[in-house]
Image: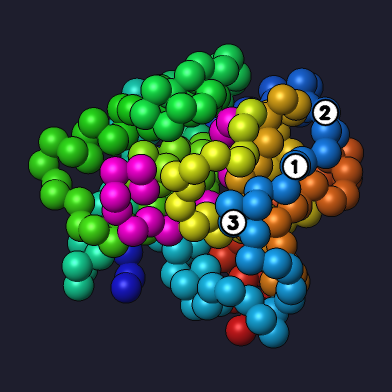
Amino acid sequence: MEPYLEQQPGRKKKNWTLIIIGIILLFSGCAKSKVDTNNDLGSGDKSNLPVTLNALIEHAEYCKGIYDSGGDRKDDVAFDVKQDNGITIIIIRGTANQSNLQSDIDVRLVRDDELGIYLHKGFRDASVSVMSNIEIGITINHTVYVTGHSLGGAIAQIIGMWLHKRGHNVQVFSYGSPKVSNQIMFSGQPTHWRVVRHSDPVPFTPPWPFFHTGLFIDSQTLDWGPDNDNGLISKTDGLDHAIIKYVTTLKAQL
């Protein structure tokens, strides 16, 4: 399914993604990630990838599309919802304005009563806003795909967990997502395909006590497994966080 977002006239924007990467790197450490046994399907490579490459490319294209559309709610998080053949697809944009930047840097941990875990406050608050807007005029199907890049990937994880807890059949696709919680082993987690590039600094953030969830997939090799904290943040490049880099490297695997 192709994104149906309409292209709007381009305009010069601040590169909020690079701004937030610079700020976060000042506080980032190299803490080793725990293993998410809830999404532990083992490990492997391109030959036994547990999700199709076409699906990874399709959802990366959705993420690129919401940036390209210019659909920015200036003081909010942009999102789009597609419904087709009984499936709801929720697409959430990454950092693109000052409000998004504030969500990124509010790293306080707050308890989410529905999930019974602690979440990054900025990401949770943004997720509440997006979810409230989605529920205003949309009936969400039983099968749901939630996808996002960067900040959008963090929100996708939280919304995916809420929907899974409420009985939906959920898959989360995240690209270059930061960490959202200090807990990784708890009930009610959806399947989460977490696509990363080793040269992207954002998946290293925030530092301890935050940990990743989901099954890591290397976009450059299609190696996959439950843990992705390989390499050093000092060898990353903020420019490699761009969603187009994810689209390009995934397509190169075809």
- Identify which residue, 167 or 136, lies in the foreground: 167
Would residue 181 be visible to someone looking at this image? yes
238 vs 113, nearest the viewer:
113
C-alpha span from label 3 to label 2: 24 Å
Q: Earlier in the sequence, mark 1 or mark 2?
A: 2
Q: CA distance from mark 1 to mark 3?
A: 12 Å
Is residue 74 among what the camera can see? no
Secondary element at image label 1: loop
Residues packed near mark 3 inside 10 Å, few (<14), some (14 to 19) or many (20 plus): many
Q: Residues within 10 Å of mark 1 (few under 14, many from 20)?
A: some
Tell me, for residue 29, which label it has, or none: 2
Give amino acid for label 1: Lys
Label 2: element kind: loop
Residue identifier under label 1: 34
Residue lying at the far left in this picture: please name it.
Answer: 137
Direction from residue 13 to residue 22 in the image, left or right:
right
Residue at the disc numbered 3 = 39
In reply to whether residue 180 is colored magenta, the answer given is yes
First to last magenta residue range: 164-181
Q: Are marks 1 and 3 in contact (CB under 8 Å)?
A: no
Q: Is residue 36 above or below residue 106?
A: below
- Horizontal arrangement in the rendering, residue 209 relative to residue 189 (left or right): right
Q: Quadrant of residue 186?
A: top right
Report the amino acid beneath label 3.
Asn
Residue 118 to residue 242: above or below: above
Q: Residue at x 70, y 56 (%)?
A: 226
| 187 with respect to 181 (left or right) | left
